[in-house]
Each structure stands twice: as structure tokens, then as C-alpha cells.
């Protein structure tokens, strides 16, 4: 299937936004790398799709994250539990 995402984000830096969908066993069932406009301290509207593979209605966790461009680690992390259908 395909998950349609629309939202707003205030990027921390100029690294891409990583969007991942994890199943309950921690496997990635979908992902997308989204390059945003340069960070300017303002919210940016984004719209994208994330292709995924599940065989039945499945509880998953949608994760949006952005890496820190100065030190190893995360600068931003957001997650949300959702259900996906094939």
C-alpha cells in the first residue's frame, strides 16, 4: 500500500527527514527520505507518500526523525502508532 502524509515541520537543520514505518517486531515495512527546504526557523509544509508492505491489517509505528548535523545522534524524533491495511 501507500501511506499519504501531509504536515508541517520546523526542520532543526538541513539534513533530510527520515520517515519509517515499523511493525510490532521492529521490522521496517516502509520508508522514505524527504529533503526539506533549508532550515530557516519557520515551519514548512510537506506532502509525501510512503510505500509499505503488509499482508493484513497491521498495527505499526510511524516514525519521523532528523539526524543532528554536528554530533552523532538525533536532532528530532516524533512517532505515532497507526494501523495499516494491505
Image: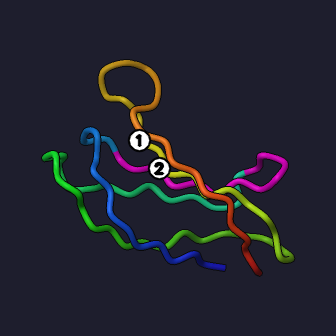
Residue 75 as seen in the image, left or right of residue 3: left
Q: Quadrant of residue 54?
A: bottom right
The percent coordinates of residue 72 (x first, y second) are 43, 20
Q: Give the range drawn in magenta.
A: 16-27
Disc 1 versus disc 2: distance between alpha carbons? 6 Å
- Residue at the image point whose x is 39% and y is 33% from the top: 75
Q: Residue at 27% of width from left, 67% of height from top?
A: 45
Q: Residue at x 66, y 69 (%)?
A: 52
Please state the horizontal and vertical placement of residue 68, each as a whole percent of the image: 36, 29
Q: State the residue at coordinates (84%, 48%).
A: 25
Q: Is residue 63 above or below residue 74?
A: below
For numbered disc 1, what is the local secondary structure?
strand
Q: Is mark 2 on a helix, strand or loop?
A: strand
Q: Which mark is residue 31?
A: none
- Above or below, 47 relative to 70: below
State which quarter of the image contains the N terminus: bottom right
Q: Name the residue under label 1.
A: 66
In magenta stretch: residue 40: no
Please tell me whether residue 85 is drawn above or below residue 29 in the rendered image.
Answer: below
Question: Residue 21 magenta-drawn?
Answer: yes
> How are the colours assigned in the image?
rainbow
Of the numbered discs in the image, which one, if any, rests on residue 18?
A: 2
Disc 1 and disc 2 in contact, CB within 8 angstroms = yes
Q: In this view, does 50 lie to the left or right of 37?
A: right
Question: The C terminus is located in which quarter?
Answer: bottom right
Amino acid at each position: 500500500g501507500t501511506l499519504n502524509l501531509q504536515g508541517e515541520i520546523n526542520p532543526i537543520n538541513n539534513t533530510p527527514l527520515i520517515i519509517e514505518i515499523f511493525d510490532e517486531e521492529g521490522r521496517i515495512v516502509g520508508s522514505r527520505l524527504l529533503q526539506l527546504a533549508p532550515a530557516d526557523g519557520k515551519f514548512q509544509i510537506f506532502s509525501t507518500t510512503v510505500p509499505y508492505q503488509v499482508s493484513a491489517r497491521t498495527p505499526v509505528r510511524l516514525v519521523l526523525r532528523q539526524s543532528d548535523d554536528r554530533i552523532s545522534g538525533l536532532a528530532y524524533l516524533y512517532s505515532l502508532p497507526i494501523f495499516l491495511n494491505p
